[in-house]
Structures are given as C-alpha cells and as structure tokens.
Image (cartoon, grey):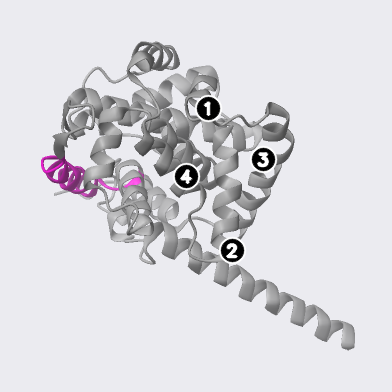
Amino acid sequence: MAAEWQCAGDREVLVGLRARISDELKATVHGGDLKLERYEGPAGDRGLLGIAPGDPAWRVHGHPTGMLTGGFAALMLQSLHPLAMAGVQQHSDFRSDPVGRLIGTARFVTTTTFGSLPAAYEAIDLVRRIHTRVNGTAPDGRAYSAADPELLTWVHTAEVSSFLAGHQAYAPRRARLTPAECDAYYRQVAPVAEALGAEKVPGSVREVERYLDGIRPRLCATPAALDSVRFLRGFGRTGRERLVVGVLMNASVGLLPDWARTELGMHRPEAVRRCWDRPRATLVGRTLEWARGPSEILAAAQRRTASPPVDE
C-alpha cells in the first residue's frame, strides 16, 4: 500500500511539473493563447504555402527544438547586416519587451506555415503595415527601410536557413530532410518572403549558399549587433528561464556558419559544441516537447487540411 501511495505521489508530481512547464512555454512563445481559430478552418484550406502534413516546411517548423535553436541562430545571423540591425536598434522593443517580440515572431511563423490562407494574409498585411513605419538612417549614414526588398530577402534567408540547420541538428535522424527535401523546404517557404515584398528569394540549398557568399562582404558585427547578442545570452525573467535560454543559445552558436561565429567573436571549440552544447540542448528540447505534448496547432491544421472543402 505504501508503495502504491508513493507511485501515486510521484505521478502527481510529474503531472504538476508537466503542467507548469507547458503553461510557461505556452505563455513565453504564444502569449498563453494559441489562437486556434487561425488553424481550424475553413475546411480543405491548404494555407499560403499550399502544403500539407509531411511536407518539409511542416516538418521543419513543427519541430520545437530545431525552431528554438534555429530562431536564436537566426537573430544572431541577422544582426550582422548593419542596416537590419539599425532598424532593430532604432525601432524594435526587443529590450523592453523581449517576450512580446518572441510571441509576435512565433505567431507570424506558425500562422503563415500552418494557418488558413485568410489568417496568413492577415498576418502578412500586419507586418507590411509595420514595415512602412520602420525606416531611418544607420550609424554609417546609409538610409534603410524595413520594406526594402533586398533587406527582406536577407532577413528571410538568414531565418529559414537557421531553422533548417536547427531541424537537421536536433530532429531524430529518421526525420531529417534529404538533400532534395531541403531544396523543397526553401521553395515552400519562399512565398512568405515574396508576399512581404522580398525579391530574388533563394529557392534551393545551392541558391542559399550562393546568396550568403555574395552578401558576406556587406556583413559585419557592429557594436549594436554585439550588444544585442550579449542581451540575448543573458535573457531570462527567472533563473530557470535563464538556464534554458543559456543552453539553447550555446547550442545555436553551433548552427551558425564558421564565418558568422568568427565575426561575432564566438570562439567556442567544436568539441564543446558537439559533446556538451548539443546533448544538453537535446535534453532540454525533449523535456519541453514532453511537457507540451502533441501540438494543438498542428492537430488543428491537420484537421483543416484533411477535411473536404465545403461546397459554396
């Protein structure tokens, strides 16, 4: 009897722990409200990307650990463009409200990937309106605008290449994308950037590599970029949150291209990245996935895409 009570007590502790972690994760990433109405209908709507469960974009954007580590890597990589960084420094509220900024970004990615076509266009229209107000002069004297097609292409390419790197590093080996599927991923996510106003968006691994090689001479770690990375590495409202962010940030360093790590002054040995950072991030990621359970967003989107369209 005592053993049964002990087992029941252990289960109760685990259930409570899982609920606390799940609630905190939902609050931090989604603001506590998943807004499932964006994903549940209309029946048969395949969304902006025109894809379905099992397609590369769903698999990459549906893997939490890859997206968290890839997201941090994307922020660091994007900071190397002086004009993009000037826009963030002069217009973003990421310092005063970093969680709000994370929630906005997460909602945009999930809505444009898994949401219905009307929900995706609503999210894109909102971002386009915001971009019209984000313009100014960078510290080096150059004018910038968040609506600049070239800048939009940079932000998109840095983001999705980091997401893909995170997925390939942290998804189970059997779930990782083949070379052909990696090319398909870039093609599938390009419409989001194009709808925002980007032009000449890379649509394959080779095109992304060529694009990054071509833009490298224009990238550098400005004081603002280095300061933003320091802010990210120390972010956290609680000790537990700072611990998780620290683990994920260290792991994200390993996703960056060698030249980006060098530019940012991140001289973390490969052995440390491979034997210490990656296993710890994998453990943290699996814990978060266990706490979250099956994704309600993906389940709603799967029901929508699998349902026959309603005849008008």
Q: Residues within 10 Å of mark 3 (few under 14, many from 20)?
A: many
Residue 311 position (above or below residue 216): below
SS at mark 2 in the image: helix
Q: For the residues carrying marks 3 and 4, which lies nearer the camera in this image? A: 4
Measure how far apart labels 3 and 1 are at the Cα level. Answer: 15 Å
User: Which numbered disc flags the more N-terminal residue, 2 or 1?
Assistant: 2
Residue 103 position (above or below residue 255): below
Q: For the residues carrying marks 3 and 1, which lies nearer the camera in this image? A: 1
Measure how far apart labels 4 and 1 are at the Cα level. Answer: 14 Å
Measure how far apart labels 2 and 3 are at the Cα level. Answer: 17 Å
Residue bearing mark 2: 240
| Residue 39: percent from left, percent from top | 32, 53
Q: Are marks 3 and 1 in contact (CB under 8 Å)?
A: no
Residue bearing mark 1: 261
Measure how far apart labels 2 and 4 are at the Cα level. Answer: 18 Å
Q: Are marks 4 and 1 in contact (CB under 8 Å)?
A: no
User: Which numbered disc flags the more N-terminal residue, 4 or 1?
Assistant: 4
Q: Is 23 situated left or right of 108 in this image?
A: right
For residue 230, the mark is 4
User: Which numbered disc flags the more N-terminal residue, 2 or 3?
Assistant: 2
Q: Is residue 265 visible?
A: yes
What's drawn in magenta, residue-wise?
Answer: 114-134
What amino acid type should be assigned to the residue bearing mark 4? Answer: Arg
Residue bearing mark 3: 277
Q: Quadrant of residue 44?
A: top left
